[in-house]
Image (cartoon, rainbow, N blue to C red):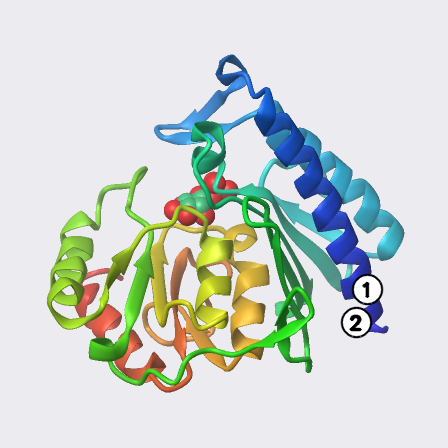
């Protein structure tokens, strides 16, 4: 299997889905929005983009199954599975606020082996495959050298559905307010991870994410010299809903802090 060639094909798929999404944004009708939950939205744009992506990916790797946000394809696949968020940052999209991205990962059993994140608003494509450097638009990217909170810009996602761990979250926010360069909430986890990979921020954590939000971005970050885990430091970040990610040098401290802030969470 030539992952580099597959990656080029996936980039083309992500960009054509991105062009469709950007085109729909121009005349987007908010009346078409459906609610999947409180502050959890979906539109025909998400669903149609996912169908387009799935159709392309079936041609690229016919034996692979799918894990997708909108559930338009459910074949399980014996070994390979595409992990797709056709529009990561749907809330941003419906408000016309950047960033929002197409996120496509490929897993081999539980291991992520390819990731493409196409951030539509700025037209930037981040990608990597197992064993490669990480790239944005053909340029190699690397995490920053930051090793402490005091040198770091931190990204997170605010809780919005399950508010059970808001106290833990605000404890963390309070800490980083006083001990970092600041905190950002961009609203697209795939983009957040790619920005840490590109050295635009140093760390990211969020609770309640799905595999399709993080699979591609996590591999891009790892290939750029970053590290990723769940809150307790194990590699179970894909399906546990917990993700901690940071530069290679800052990761140990950042993960320890998040584990401490969320120590009451089982
Ligand atoms: C969302 C984004 C956002 C995060 C949410 C996710 P979606 O993905 O990644 O940053 O805070 O938890 O659900 O729903 O727009 O694909």
Q: Say whether residue 188 is visible.
A: yes
In the image, which disc is placed on residue 3? 2
- Whether the residue under disc 2 has CB within 8 Å of ligand 1: no
Q: Position of residue 206 (x, y in %)?
A: 34, 57
Q: Secondary structure at mark 1?
A: helix
Identify which residue is drawn at 71% across, 57% down.
81
Question: Relative to 22, does residue 237 appear above or below in the rendering?
Answer: below
- Residue at image position (36%, 76%) is 233
Q: Nearer the viewer, residue 260 or 28?
A: 28
Please state the horizontal and vertical placement of residue 73, each as a whole percent of the image.
72, 39
Q: Label 1 near label 2: C-beta < 8 Å? A: yes
> Where residue 132 appears, x then y in whole percent?
68, 80
Q: Is the N terminus in the top left, top right, bottom left or bottom right quadrant?
A: bottom right
Q: Secondary structure at mark 2?
A: helix
Task: Report how many numbered discs are placed on residues in the image.
Answer: 2
Comparing 75 with 166, the one in front is: 166
Q: Nearer the viewer, residue 48 or 126?
A: 126
Check disc 1 and report the residue beneath it.
6
> Residue 260 is drawn in which quadrant?
bottom left
| Residue at the spot 49% in from the left edge and 58% down from the top edge | 239
């Amino acid at each position: 299997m030539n992952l580099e060639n597959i990656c080029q094909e996936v980039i083309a798929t992500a960009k054509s889905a991105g062009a469709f999404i950007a085109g729909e944004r121009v005349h987007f009708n908010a009346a078409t929005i459906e609610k999947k939950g409180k502050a959890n939205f979906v539109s025909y744009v998400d669903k149609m983009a996912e169908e387009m992506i799935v159709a392309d990916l079936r041609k690229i790797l016919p034996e692979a199954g799918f894990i997708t946000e909108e559930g338009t394809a459910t074949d399980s696949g014996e070994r390979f599975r595409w992990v797709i968020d056709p529009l990561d940052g749907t809330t941003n999209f419906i408000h016309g606020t950047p960033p929002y991205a197409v996120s496509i990962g490929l897993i081999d059993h539980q291991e992520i082996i390819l990731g493409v994140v196409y951030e539509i608003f700025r037209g930037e494509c981040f990608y990597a495959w197992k064993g490669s450097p990480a790239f944005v638009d053909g340029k190699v990217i690397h995490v920053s050298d930051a090793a402490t909170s005091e040198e770091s810009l931190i990204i997170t996602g605010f809780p919005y559905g399950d508010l059970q761990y808001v106290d833990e979250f605000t404890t963390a926010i309070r800490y980083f307010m006083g001990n970092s360069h600041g905190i950002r909430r961009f609203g697209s986890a795939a983009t957040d991870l790619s920005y840490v990979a590109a050295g635009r921020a140093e760390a990211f954590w969020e609770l309640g994410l799905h595999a399709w939000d993080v699979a591609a971005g996590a591999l891009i970050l790892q290939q750029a010299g970053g590290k990723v885990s769940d809150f307790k430091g194990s590699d179970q970040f894909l399906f546990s809903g917990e993700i901690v990610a940071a530069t290679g040098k800052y990761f140990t401290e950042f993960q320890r802090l998040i584990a401490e802030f969320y120590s009451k969470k089982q």
